[in-house]
Image: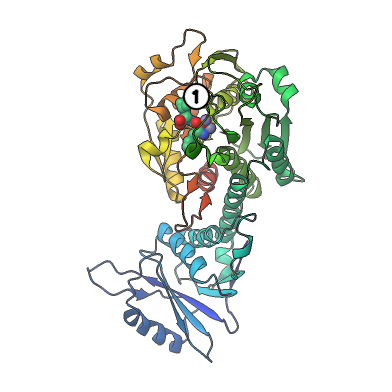
C-alpha cells in the first residue's frame, strides 16, 4: 500500500502538488490556489497562479494538470482540483492524484493552511483506494508511485485523520482482495483461513469457525442445504471484537456464497460469470470488524459469515425441498438460486437467539433486483427502525458510498406463504429485493425492530475505474460500517 507521511518541511521535492479550489460564486469567477502552510516560496506561487488561466483550469474535483520545470526544484508542479473543498471533493481529488502521479515515485502535497480532519481523511482514502490493484490479475501494472508526503505547518494535528484513513483503506482493500479472488481458490475453508490469519495474535479478537459437523449438531439447516452440493463443505465464521470498554454490542452478518451457480435452478451464462463476488457481504463485515479492532473502537462487534458454495450436483438441494433453520422454522425453497437468504436466515436466527445484541445489521449480494431498482452504485437499505436507518444512511453517505431506504410493506407478507413450510424462499411476485428483505426479517425474532439489512449486489462491483473505485470488487460497505461503528461509543 502506498506510504502516506506527514512533514513540516520537505527537502527538495521532485513533484509538488498544489490544491486549486473551484470558485462557484459569483458565476464565472476564477479558480484559486489554496493557501497552504507552510507558505509556498513566492516564485512557485506566482508560477502556479499563472498556470490557472493558461491551463484553463476550473478547479473541479478530479482535475489534474502537470507542469514540467526542467533543471529546477521542484521539477514538476501538479495542480489538483479540489472543487468546493468538501470531503467528497477531496476524496475525488485524492483518487485523481493517485492516477495523475502513477508514474512518479514520490510526490509532496501541500495541505491547505486550514485543513481539518474530514478533508485529510478523504484525501488519503481517495489516494489509497484509487491506487488499489488486485495482486493476481494486475501484478504487471503496479503503479510506480510508492509515497506521498503531506506538507503541513503542524503535522501532528493530522496524524489521527491519516491513521483512520489508512486503516479504513487497508480494510476496504482486504474486502476487495477477498471478493476479487477466483472461486477455485476461495472455497469456504479458504475464506475462514483468511479470517484466521488476519485476526491472529490480536488480543480481544476471538474467532470460532464451525464446520459441517457442528453446523449439523446445532441445527444450521439453511447453510447445510445450500452448501450440500459442493465438494467444499460450508463453514460459519464467528469473529468477535470484544474490547473491555465496549458500550454497545452490534452483530454484523454477511452473505458468504463463495460461488453461486444458482444450483439446480442454474443461472444462464451471463448471470453466472461474476458470481465469485457473491461473498462480498461477508468480506465487508469481516473487514469492518477487523477495522474496528485496529482502531480499537469501544463497541463490541460480532461478525457472522455463513460460507457456502452453491453448486449443481447429485447432493445439491432441490426446488421444492423443505429446509429447517436454526430457529426451528421451515422454508420451502422453490428456486435454489434464492440461496443467500437461506444461509442468512440461520445466521440471523442464531444472532437473535444466542447473541442478543443491541443492533443487528446484515449485508448481502442478495438480488439482481437491487440494480433494477437503484442502478449500479446504490445499495437498498431496509429497516423498521427510523433512527437506525437514518444513522446508517448518514454514515454510508459521509463515507462516500450510497444507499437508499426501501419499504417493507406489510401487505406483501402474504406472498411468503407456502403449502409445505412456514414460508416460501422465493415468491414469484416481483419486488425481488423487497421480498428478500421481508423474508429475512422473519428470522430476527425479538431484534426485529433493531435490525437493518442492505442488499448491496449492485454497488459491490464496478465495471470500470471511477474516482476511488477501481474496476472489479469495490469493498462496498466497509467504509460506511466503520464510520457508523465509530459513532456508537
Ligand atoms: N447472488 C444472486 C444475486 C445477485 C445478482 C448478486 C446479480 C449480484 C449480481 C442471488 O443469489 C440470486 O440469484 N438472486 C435471485 C433471486 C431470485 C431467485 C428470487 C435473483 O436476483 O434473480
Ligand atoms: Mn443465487
Ligand atoms: Zn447468490
Q: Where does residue 18 sit, x and y in percent of width and height? A: 45, 75
Looking at the picture, tell me which residue is in the foreground, 345 or 116.
Answer: 345
Circle 1: element type: helix
Residue at the spot 33% in from the left edge and 82% down from the top edge: 54
39, above or below 207, in the image: below
Q: Residue furthest top?
A: 419
411, above or below 110, in the image: above
Answer few, some or many: residues within 10 Å of disc 1's Cα (few below 14, many 20 plus, some between 14 and 19). Answer: many
Residue at the spot 56% in from the left edge and 60% down from the top edge: 128
On-image quarter of the C terminus: top right
Q: Residue furthest bottom?
A: 71
| Colour logic | rainbow
Q: Residue furthest left?
A: 27
Q: Where does residue 380 sit, x and y in percent of width and height? A: 42, 36
Count of numbered tags: 1
On-image quarter of the N terminus: bottom right
Q: Where does residue 157 sit, x and y in percent of width and height? A: 55, 65
Residue 361 can be seen, yes or no: no
467, above or below 406, in the image: below
The picture quadrant where one finds residue 434 is top left
400, above or below 431, in the image: below
Residue 79 can be seen, yes or no: yes
Residue at the spot 55% in from the left edge and 64% down from the top edge: 158
Looking at the picture, tell me which residue is in the foreground, 291 or 443.
Answer: 443
Q: Where does residue 397 sit, x and y in percent of width and height? A: 42, 47
The picture quadrant where one finds residue 143 is bottom right
Residue that carries the numbered disc 1 in the rendered image:
440
- Answer yes or no: disc 1 within 8 Å of ligand 1: no
Amino acid at each position: 500500500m502506498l506510504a502516506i507521511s506527514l512533514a513540516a518541511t520537505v527537502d527538495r521535492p521532485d513533484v509538488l502538488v498544489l490544491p486549486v479550489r473551484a470558485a462557484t460564486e459569483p458565476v464565472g469567477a476564477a479558480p484559486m490556489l489554496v493557501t497552504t502552510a507552510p507558505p509556498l516560496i513566492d516564485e512557485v506561487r506566482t508560477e502556479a497562479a499563472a498556470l490557472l488561466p493558461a491551463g484553463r483550469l476550473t478547479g473541479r474535483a478530479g482535475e489534474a494538470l502537470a507542469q514540467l520545470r526542467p533543471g529546477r526544484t521542484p521539477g514538476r508542479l501538479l495542480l489538483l482540483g479540489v472543487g468546493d473543498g468538501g470531503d467528497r471533493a477531496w476524496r475525488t481529488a485524492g483518487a485523481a492524484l493517485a492516477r495523475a502521479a502513477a508514474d512518479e515515485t514520490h510526490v509532496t502535497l501541500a495541505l491547505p493552511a486550514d485543513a481539518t480532519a474530514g478533508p485529510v481523511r478523504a484525501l488519503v482514502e481517495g489516494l489509497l483506494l484509487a491506487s488499489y490493484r488486485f495482486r493476481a490479475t494486475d501484478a504487471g501494472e503496479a503503479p510506480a508511485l510508492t509515497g506521498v508526503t503531506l506538507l503541513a505547518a503542524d503535522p501532528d494535528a493530522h496524524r489521527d485523520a491519516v491513521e483512520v484513513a489508512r486503516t479504513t483503506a487497508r480494510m476496504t482493500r482486504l474486502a476487495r482482495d477477498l471478493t476479487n479472488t477466483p472461486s477455485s481458490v476461495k472455497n469456504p475453508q479458504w475464506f475462514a483461513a483468511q479470517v484466521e490469519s488476519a485476526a491472529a495474535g490480536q488480543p480481544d479478537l476471538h474467532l470460532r469457525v464451525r464446520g459441517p459437523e457442528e453446523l449439523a449438531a446445532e441445527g444450521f439447516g439453511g447453510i447445510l442445504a445450500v452448501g450440500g452440493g459442493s465438494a467444499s463443505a460450508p463453514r460459519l465464521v464467528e469473529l468477535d471484537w470484544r474490547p473491555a470498554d465496549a458500550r454497545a454490542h452490534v452483530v454484523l452478518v454477511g452473505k458468504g456464497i463463495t460461488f453461486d451457480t444458482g444450483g439446480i435452478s442454474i443461472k444462464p451464462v451471463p448471470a453466472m460469470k461474476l458470481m465469485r463476488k457473491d461473498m462480498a457481504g461477508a468480506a465487508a463485515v469481516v473487514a469492518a470488524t477487523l477495522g474496528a479492532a485496529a482502531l480499537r473502537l469501544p463497541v463490541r462487534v460480532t461478525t457472522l459469515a455463513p460460507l457456502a458454495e452453491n453448486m449443481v450436483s447429485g447432493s445439491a438441494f432441490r426446488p421444492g425441498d423443505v429446509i429447517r433453520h436454526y430457529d426451528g422454522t421451515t422454508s420451502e425453497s422453490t428456486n435454489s438460486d434464492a440461496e443467500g437468504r437461506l444461509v442468512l436466515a440461520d445466521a440471523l436466527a442464531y444472532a437473535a437467539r444466542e447473541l442478543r445484541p443491541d443492533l443487528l445489521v446484515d449485508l448481502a449480494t442478495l438480488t439482481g433486483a437491487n440494480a433494477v431498482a437503484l442502478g449500479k452504485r446504490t445499495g437498498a437499505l431496509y429497516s423498521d427502525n427510523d433512527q437506525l436507518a437514518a444513522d446508517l444512511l448518514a454514515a454510508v453517505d459521509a463515507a462516500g458510498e450510497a444507499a437508499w431506504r426501501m419499504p417493507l410493506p406489510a401487505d406483501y407478507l402474504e406472498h411468503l406463504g407456502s403449502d409445505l413450510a412456514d414460508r416460501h424462499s422465493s415468491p414469484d411476485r416481483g419486488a425481488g429485493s423487497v421480498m428478500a428483505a421481508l423474508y429475512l426479517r422473519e428470522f430476527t425474532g425479538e431484534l426485529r425492530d433493531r435490525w437493518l439489512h442492505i442488499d448491496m449486489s449492485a454497488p459491490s462491483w464496478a465495471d470500470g475505474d471511477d474516482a476511488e473505485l477501481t474496476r472489479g470488487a469495490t469493498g462496498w460497505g466497509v467504509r460506511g460500517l466503520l464510520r457508523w461503528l465509530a459513532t456508537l461509543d
